[in-house]
Amino acid sequence: MLSSLDIPVCSEVLSNETMRSFCLGTKISTCRHIYHYYIHGPKGNETNAVTKDVSPFNNIDIEISMFEKGKVPKIVNLREIKDDMQTLYINTAADSFEFKAHVEGEGIVEGIIRYHPFLYDKETYPDDPCFPSKLNDDDDDDCFIVEKGARGKRPIFECFWNGRLIPYTTVEDFDWCAPPKKRGLAPIECYNRISGALFTNDKFQVSTNKLTFMDLELKLKDKNTLFTRIFNGQEQRMKIDREFALWLKDCHEKYDKQIKFTVFKGITTRTDLPSKRMQSPWAMYAAIEWDGKTYKTGQLVKTVKTLPIFYGSIEKFFLYGDHDGDIFSTGGEVQIALEPQALYGEMKVIPISKLDRTVSEKAVKKYIEDEMARLPDKLSVTWPEGDELLPNETRFAGTPIGALRIEILNKKGEAMQKLPGTSHGGSKKLLVELKVILHSPTGNKEIISHISQHGGKWPYWFKKMENLQKLGNYTLKLQVVLNESNADTYAGRPLPSKIFKFTIIEGKPEKFSVGLLDLPFRIGVPFNIPLELQDEFGHATQLTAGIKPILEASGLTLQYGEVTTGTKCIIKGVTAKGSINSCQGKNFNMKVTLPGLKEDTQIFKIRLQPGPPHQLKVKPDSEVLRIENGTAFPFQVEVLDESGNITAQPKLVVHCKFLGASNLPVYSVDCSNAGTNILTGPVIHVQNIKKDQMLKARIEILSCKDVPPVEKIIKLLPSSHVARLQILSMDGQKAIQIKHQDEINWLAGDVMHNLIFQMYDEGEREIHITPALAEKIKVNWTPKINKEHLIQGLLPDVKVPTSVKDVRYCLITYLDDHVSLESAFTVRPRPDEPKHIKCKLKGPNTLQIGEELQGEIDVVITDQYGNQIQTVTSACVNSLGISGPGLDKSNLKITWQESTLTMRVKGIRFKPCLLGSKELCFAWREFSDFLRINLTAGSPAKLQFVDWPELEKPVAVINGKELQKPLIVQLCDQWGNPSPEPNVKISLTKSINLKIVPSNQQHKTDDNGRANLGVISIHAPRGEHTLQLKASYNKTTLDCPIITFNVLPDPEKPVRLNVKYDKNPSFPAGGTFTDFMVSVLSEDDNVIKNINPARISMKMWEGQSSGTGIPVDVTTFSCSKVKDDKEDGFFYFRDKVVPERVGTYSIQFTFAMDKTNMLNSDQIIVEVVPNDPVRLLPDPLPATPAVSNVRTLTSRTLVKDLYLHVMDEYNNHTGIDLVGRIIAKIKSPNEDEDIEIPQFEGKVSTIEFPFSKGSSEINLVLAENSPGRDSTEYILVFEPDLPALKKPLEPYRLSFMFYNDFKKQQQMATLTKERDQLSQSIGVYRNWFDTTNQLVNEMKCQVKEAETRESHMKNELKKHQIEIPQTNKLQYVDSLIKQKKLDQERVMKQPRRTCTLPNYPKGNQDILGKIAHLAQIEDNEAAKVISWHLASDMDCVVTLTTEAARSIFDETQGRQQVLPLDSIYKKTLPDWNRPLPHLRNGKICFRPIGNPVFARDLLTFPDNVEHCQTVFGMLLGDTIIIDNLDAANHYRKEVVKITHCPTLLTREGDRIRSNGKFGGLQNKAPPMDKLRGMVFGAPMPKLYSTFSGQIELLQQYRTAVVKLDNVNKDLDLQLQSLNTPEMQKKKQELAEQEKSLMLIEQKLGMTPSDKVMESLLQPMVLDMSDTPIPPKRMRRETVKKLYSSEEWISCPSKKQQQQQQQQLLQITPSELNGPPRKRKA
């Protein structure tokens, strides 16, 4: 078996005598390795496969037998071995990379690379005992324990030749799969996890023993070798190195699982790495799981294979990459803090693999503790020179501190000068720093700072310190620091230090100063003197015992109480006494002496003020004081201190209280400022004092209880001032006293005379009245008082009121500085004798006619002042009489009212008479009185129109127009008086055919009894129509009027269109219509003139509409230009093109009355007939025949059932009445070439067919064995012979192919059919592309035109100072238009002069209007004077014709003045361009003053300028406007010297007539308001027209911008559609079809002919439009000839064109090629 398989290696092994010395298993494995793929097939032994396919190689078995003497032979089947290397390679691989190499020649090598991942804690790469991967090299500092990786130093590829291992040839690697020199996409260790195999074909040479390839590696590594990747069984050419790197990176990320990283902490950037590319991203973790152990942050670890070995604690773990959770990885790094940190204080980052996984935590801790004992631990301090500083010692300022000697000791007690050295960091020297720190309230201050270093032979030393003088708490600190950085910590641990705390206090006192004193200093008031004592350094200190202060001051006696000791020394209770002449105080020098001090005396200045109040001093000094009652007494008071100085202090108020009577005042005065003042107050007044009275005055200071009061005796005397008034009335010699508040009855209207008065003092002594006293006496009944009468004791007379209801209150007052006296009495009037009667109406004074007065009239008898007489009786009733105009006395009643003493009258009513105020006369004895009664209308009884006289005649009104004035009706009573009854409902009834607008037929009367029906418009047929009003009041129907309207037709309202045309001619297709003459008729059947031709249009559509509506798809024409010889008001539609398609068409004319309403004419139905015959065409278009001369009939048939028709130029069937024949013959394409011509059946060259009714049926067959050249193109010619035609028709030609071979003819027939279809499709494509290109060109022209228009409008706006921004144009223009319109509206609303004269209704277009409305004048003064000058003509109505004037005259019964223009003799009218009279022949005859100007030049005409110039030329003539009368006289005086002077009007209102007369009221214009609105209105301000022009320009610019934007969008959309995939596809299809057509024609042997293409395309082009109007873009030339630009309105819109293009884009090629033609059997 072995020899048959040619296995030399096994044979050699088995034949070797020494085979017993080898392991049988090893040899078997070797054989299994060599023949692995023989046994298991190309995929190898996949033991891990889920589904194992049945291999076709299962029939190969290799067994190895080993024979030993005396033993049973051992037989092993190689298929059963599971641990050979290839099996291990295959089943431990996670992924594979297949490739193929093409070497020079036919050598092909297929290769596979397998990836063996690292799983959790080990490599999965199979270990080969012949090549151990773990090498014990200790000189590698890399991060992995497996230094060379999984494969070790084994080559990657094993080589197989035809499936058999060539064991002695291996390939180390290729350039693209070797480890890169720079870091690649995958880690470098991944390149050691790949194994591979190369499988060659038999094109590579091997040695005869099949152990070695001869040149495999050389060929594979040749530069011409091409490597490709095998992916999913497909060979792909790509960059093999890039693909392999990506595959390896993917394998590493998917399958390697070495270390598990947990507790994700985030992503960071490591700036400690030199390569910036590797600095980020790094994921941070707090723990890892590795080799069954967990390592966490803070755990103590030790490293291996590092120099030196590190001990430390874990800080964090790093894993390169952008991770966000737990993950397995092959490597990573760990950051550790070196321990002990106190010794090292640094971080190290090392690979995770260098962690010692065998060391225990205890061993690491023991090492750290040993290291810690070497660190400095404490300080040893000694004082060699004394002055030792003890802890917490208190010292006087200036006491020195001795020198210090210091040693640094570690925990072992050893002195040290530097840190213990480390093998990696080097040793650092130690220094000792001394600092003395003062702890002050503002913070710690460093007083002394020194650093000492060890001298080698001498220890650390600091000198004596003697400059500590500041008081406070101190700290002396000795601190060990590092030499270089002066840091007092090392690795986060403080270095040894020692602290001495002590305090420095002040020394003995040496000098002093006086502190701040508390102001003020006053006599007798103790005060303190603070002293500040200091030692020799200026520190505050205490006063020692035994020192007594000495105080001295000149002029003062000083004493003090005690002296306090301590930190603050104060001399307390210092008092001073002495004389001070000023209340403001006096300055003194005070001397303080402290015996025993080095500086023992201080002198300072103080200001001493008077002391507190001690006593009062009152002047006058006498004990008894005399004063008069009613007077005030002044006291001079002084407040003194204990030294007798006048003193003052706040709130120092002196009071004086009077005792001995009631209601005595209290005096008080404020002495706070000066200590002295005048004490006084209100007068001392005791009531009813008749004799002297004794009072006591007590003067004291209430706020100072220690100051004793002062008492004085007051003797009060009775006052000599006025104390009482007495009023007397003299009645003859008798005096009657009038007491206060007395009431006196006196005759009404009388005067009280002889009133006297007297005055007495408190002692009842009468006081003589002096002029001074008289001045103080006032009375309230008169403003003026006779002073002399007052001195005599006489009061003014009192006038008694005339009405008993008025009571006169009389008051006499006396007012002086001491007293206010008054005396009053009341005068009540009493009635006098009867003098009058008074009438009083109770109730309303309004009385309806015919009704009785509801109220009552009371008649009262009064005196002359209207006071009712109380003494009358009932007998007076008989003397009362009543009269009045129209008074009805039949029911009159007079009664006596006892309770009110009045006479009551009832039953007042009036007979029918004039309404208004009625006067009733009431008479009693010789007295009388009048009463007005307002007599009003009675109850409503009828309705009457207001301001509508002569309603018995019909009122003329134009149909559809409003009445001249509103309809106002008034309620009236039965006598015709207006009745003001509100809310009476009024309704309208009218004729059936009468329509009024507004249609509201219900109205109510207002408070005046009127109802305004408004200005209504009448709509009714011509003739008379009635309108009746109906109303009822209190269920009673009122008498209502009837108004008759004479409705006249509206001459300006279009009602129908009149169309005139020639109805006889026929309309051939493509010809021109007859002329249409259209006019617009009004209601009076007259032609309306002055109509814009653009408002009339002609519409045409195919078919006949059943209703009145117009279809959507219509063609619109505008009217032609009006010829000069035609009448105005007629519009012509000339030379309009007849549609090209035969059929029935509708024509209708429309008139646009406004934007929404159209007036249509009757529809005109026309029949379009065919035009003259021009061509002969078949229907349908036949395919190009391909025939042969064989026996088969179908192969010889040229055409079958072909119908030839006579067509006009628009493809309409024509010639129905023609009779003739069609002659068929065959011709050669080239007339010059002499070739055989095929013959028809029967061996004839021509055949005739009859022609009738416009068509002929054709059937043609070639003769059997007909002559003709094979594969030759011939032309079948059909010549029409129609004798009735004047012009012969062109024959129809049809090309066909002739073949002698039947089979070839069949093939060519198919090709011919394809050619026809391609030709038709190409024609459609080309036509469509031409149309599209033409559309784009037209759009570009539109864009250019829109840009030009936009630029032009922008320049026009710039001329008006309107700048347009580059952006947001539309928003800016819209806002500007809005603003301009607001400005325009504001200008329009400004008040201006208007003519309020009502205009005459323009019922006829021959009526221009009233003269006052025809012109406008801007200048106010000129408007006033011209309006006044033409006052008699302002109401005149101007008409164009006398007929219109006569009509107005008849309608107004001759009341309206009229002026027809056709009756004016125009030759005498002035020339409007004539210069002023002082200008002759272009020269100025004299210098005028006053700014003369023709009056007509000041007029502006809104409408009808030419007619208005005629009117005002006749009315004004050459009238001149000038400034004033002086200027006018000067002008006239100069003008008459040279020519006639016209009328002169001045702006001030004067007039000088043409005859020179001026002056008088008739030549002076009244003020403007006197003209009663008959004045020419003012035109719109110029600013209004400016705004209008700007708004119009802005709107035009906006329209231009919008149009430009739209056409740009349309163009962009069209250009985009040309670049769409569908369009590109159509272009490609056209190119392919043209190419196919060229090939088919070459095969057919046909030369491409444009004529043939044209014949193919022509019918299609003509059939593309079924509309009656030729397409504008296809027949541009024809359209240009037939239609002008202003006539053509309707054209296919862009949207319709785009829709047509979209429809064309959706056509499939098969649809373009057309359906296959069917032939009849």
Image (cartoon, rainbow, N blue to C red):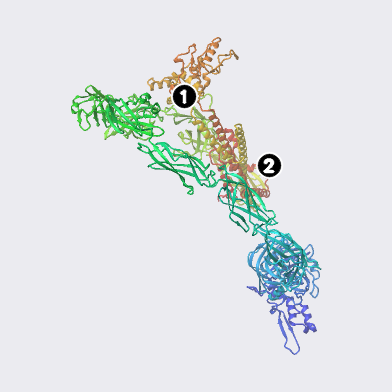
In the foreground, 773 or 959: 773
Residue 85 location, quadrant: bottom right
**Amino acid under disc 2:** Asn
**Quick one: 564 or 823, which is closer to the camera?**
564
Q: Position of residue 1260 (x, y in %)?
A: 59, 45
Residue 274, by quadrant, is bottom right
Q: Is residue 120 above or below residue 633?
A: below
Q: Which mark is residue 1230?
A: 2
The label on residue 163 is none
Image position of 23 with respect to 184: above or below: below
Task: Decide: few, some or many residues near mark 2? Use Cα within 10 Å; few <14, some 14-19, many ≥20.
Answer: few
Residue under numbered circle 1: 1413
Count of marks placed on residues:
2
Q: Amino acid at mark 1?
A: His
169 lies left or right of 397: right
Q: Is residue 403 left or right of residue 815?
A: right
Identify whether 1025 is placed above or below 1295: above
Tag 1 near tag 2, CB within 8 Å: no
